């Protein structure tokens, strides 16, 4: 009985805190903004054109009410809409979903959406500009910093022999020759035109290779068209990884394999400036929850130690 009373009181407090939190127009606007992905405090300030102290206060109220979560990326703190599975807060999640189901009627909707898209475009432009500038030297930079030989063998070990493999964020195509030992056809996609141009030097005349410049969030591929997808050191450059994972799930065949190689969570702030990283690595639990929400079964999660201070996260998953 005591436990039931405690649970009831906790649920009642949760309901009161959440409903009180959304009684403010600015906080409703923040929930709408975060429906497009995670944003730093400074980005929310820029979108809403309000003072930082004011925005920080609203974010604190929303966090304490269980309506939003936060994560630290080096010196930056990002706010996001959590999922029930990772936070265990059913009512705040349902309340947010209800609010967002009336998105067309939310205050300042069009203005906020326009500002959100400007922020996302600025992120994309910065990343694209960086990779266009390092296309010729990218393989050397990778070798010096992340030692791709260490995780390339893992990728090839986990991939099945199949018809079609998608190389997500293929860069200048360093992994493609190895993937051709696993598949009859490899499709390499990258957001950077210079990366694709460099890859074309080696593969333009190879009928077993297709190269496409495209945003990762909108792959120009048919649903259920790929047997396997490799995402090697690309996710930490993506603004909102869950969106890309949903797109990967769309193009993968049922039972298809996804191999993810990326950095584990770290605090090397210089990676943001020197390599245009949007994420300072990932916690395995967070990535696993994203995969589950996108319709994947996680088969294995591992770790590879590099010769540097970085640890490499490896994840194999299959589409349900």
Image (cartoon, grey):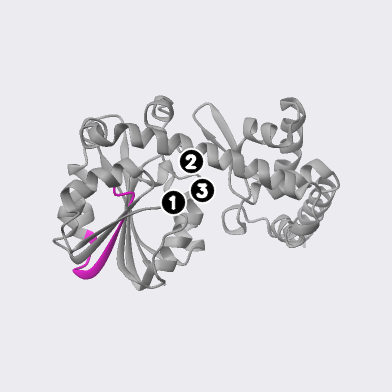
For label 3, the SS is: loop
Q: Earlier in the sequence, mark 2 or mark 1?
A: 2
For label 2, the SS is: helix
Q: Quadrant of the N terminus?
A: bottom right
Q: Which residues are magenta?
A: 158-171
> How far apart are labels 2 and 1 at the CA level?
9 Å
For the residues carrying marks 3 and 2, which lies nearer the camera in this image?
2
Reading the image, the residue beneath label 1 is: 215
Q: Is residue 29 above or below residue 56?
A: below
Q: Earlier in the sequence, mark 3 or mark 2?
A: 2
Rendering quarter of residue 9: bottom right
Reading the image, the residue beneath label 2 is: 124
Reading the image, the residue beneath label 3 is: 240
Q: Mark 3 Cα within 10 Å, few/some/many (few <14, many 20+)? A: some
Residue located 76% across and 53% down the image: 10
Marks 2 and 1: CB-CB under 8 Å? yes
Picture coordinates of residue 186 (x, y %)? 24, 61
The answer to whether 260 appears left or right of 246 in the picture is left
The one of 210 and 87 positioned closer to us in this rendering: 210
Report if residue 157 is visible in the image.
yes
For label 1, the SS is: loop
Picture coordinates of residue 203 (x, y %)? 18, 53
The answer to whether 200 appears left or right of 220 in the picture is left
Q: Mark 2 Cα within 10 Å, few/some/many (few <14, many 20+)? A: some
């Amino acid at each position: 009985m005591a436990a039931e009373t405690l649970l009831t009181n906790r649920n009642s407090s949760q309901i009161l805190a959440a409903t009180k939190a959304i009684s403010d127009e600015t906080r409703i606007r923040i929930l709408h903004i975060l429906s497009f992905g995670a944003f730093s405090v400074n980005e929310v300030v820029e979108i809403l054109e309000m003072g930082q102290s004011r925005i920080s206060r609203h974010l604190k109220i929303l966090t304490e009410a269980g309506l939003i979560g936060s994560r630290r990326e080096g010196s930056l703190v990002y706010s996001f809409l959590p999922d029930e599975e990772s936070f265990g807060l059913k009512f705040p999640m349902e309340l947010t979903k209800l609010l967002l189901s009336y998105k067309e009627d939310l205050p300042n909707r069009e203005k906020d959406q326009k500002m959100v898209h400007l922020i996302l475009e600025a992120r994309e432009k910065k990343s694209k500009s960086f990779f266009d500038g390092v296309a010729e030297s990218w393989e050397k930079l990778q070798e010096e910093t992340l030692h791709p030989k260490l995780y390339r063998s893992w990728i090839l070990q986990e991939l099945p022999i199949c018809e079609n493999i998608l190389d997500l964020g293929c860069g200048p195509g360093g992994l493609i020759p190895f993937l051709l030992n696993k598949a009859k056809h490899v499709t390499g996609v990258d957001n950077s035109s210079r990366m694709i141009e460099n890859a074309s030097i080696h593969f333009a005349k190879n009928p077993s290779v297709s190269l496409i410049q495209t945003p990762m969030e909108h792959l120009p591929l048919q649903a259920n068209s790929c047997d396997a997808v490799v995402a090697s050191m690309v996710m930490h450059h993506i603004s909102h990884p869950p969106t890309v994972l949903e797109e990967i799930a769309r193009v993968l065949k049922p039972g298809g394999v996804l191999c993810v190689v990326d950095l584990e969570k770290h605090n090397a702030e210089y990676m943001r400036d020197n390599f245009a990283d949007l994420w300072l690595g990932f916690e395995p639990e967070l990535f696993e929850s994203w995969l589950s929400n996108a319709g994947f079964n996680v088969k294995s999660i591992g770790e590879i130690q590099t010769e540097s201070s970085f640890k490499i996260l490896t994840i194999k998953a299959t589409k349900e």
